Amino acid sequence: MASVAVELAGQQGLCTMSPKNNPADEAEDLREAEAAFNEARRYLFGIAYRMLGCVSESEDILQEAWIRWQTYDRSKVENARAFLTTTVTRLAINVLESARVRRQAYVGPWLPEPVDTSSDPALGALNAEALEVAVMMLLEKLTPTERAAYVLREAFDYPYEQIAEIIGQTQANARQLVSRARKHLVAGKRASVAAADHQRFLTVFVAAAQEGNVAVLEKLFTEDVVSYADGGGVVRASKFPVVGRQRVAKYYHAFADRFWPGVTVEPVEANGRPAVSLSRDGTVFAVLTVSVTPDGIDRVLVMMNPSKIAAMAV
């Protein structure tokens, strides 16, 4: 792989394509650049999305990466994917640093934006690691550089030497970043269950929630279950997580009569796991999923912020 330092030299807007005398050659060169970018696009989106948990921000990063790739002197680049991966990762680190500040002022719990992996299987084709909503919430506890190193290593199997070049660290530091990230995640991550079991728990939960059946809900939950509802201050939703088996069961019992009448429940796949979309009068207003461990449901995740569910509502 060409040196990242050489490949990224001048990426602060100073680098431009070396002039070509032949317009036909220039047009062909641009077509080749576009083809290389499009070939890597879903792969690059997978990196950006896992780091940011936001589709629109990830798309913005890809657009910026395309502009830089389009205007760069590509004759200096030996490996297009390596160049683009480095560009996207570093842009994502910068965005994540500012996003962390914005999320501190977010109204209510912040949940990652769900993506429909049934219609976009390439997103999780390489590795589903760091794609599940509950895992992405744990990634929020990492520093931007730790998150980048972890995603590149665990989700995309990059060697430490290449991770170090991409994030501008020594190889020893890259190993340390991944190690710290793993320890953070191990402390909060629990064993998951097979997709069929996940679907079964989700189906029973939705039915019990619709009925407000406290007894069934309590049997489904772990002792320390937490329910999160992300309305982003745009729609009505609980501004604080609800914690504990009995409290969460009573919470869903309390608003069953107001929340569920007229709601159509449709199965979807969000972030590689079973979920449901909830609509009323033909309009999707929530995407709901659960995190399931061998002991039961330990997280209920309800995404209601309209901007976050827009893509799932199409």
Image (cartoon, rainbow, N blue to C red):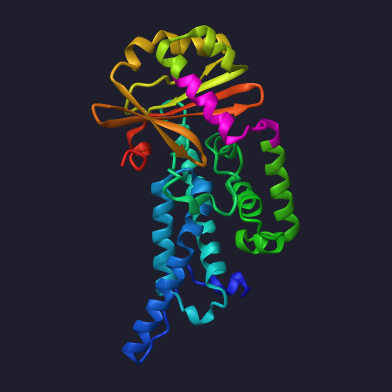
Task: Classify residue 125 as left or right of residue 73.
Answer: right
Q: Is residue 200 magenta?
A: yes
Most extreme residue toward the right is: 172
Percent x, y for residue 44?
50, 58
* Residue 260 visible in image: yes
Q: Nearer the viewer, residue 55 or 89?
A: 55
The answer to whether residue 12 of the structure is visible from this angle is no
The image shows residue 249, relative to residue 308, as above or below, that is above
Range of magenta residues = 186-206
Residue 92 rendering spot, x and y as whole percentages: 50, 53
- Which residue is rendered at x = 47% and y = 9% of the image? 213
Q: Give the camera-side residue of 61 and 120.
A: 120
Q: Residue furthest left?
A: 281
Q: In this picture, is 120 found above or below 297?
A: below
List x then y, in percent, for residue 193. 63, 32
Instruction: Say which of 258 and 102 sits in front.
Output: 258
Q: Reply above or below: 121 against 33.
A: above
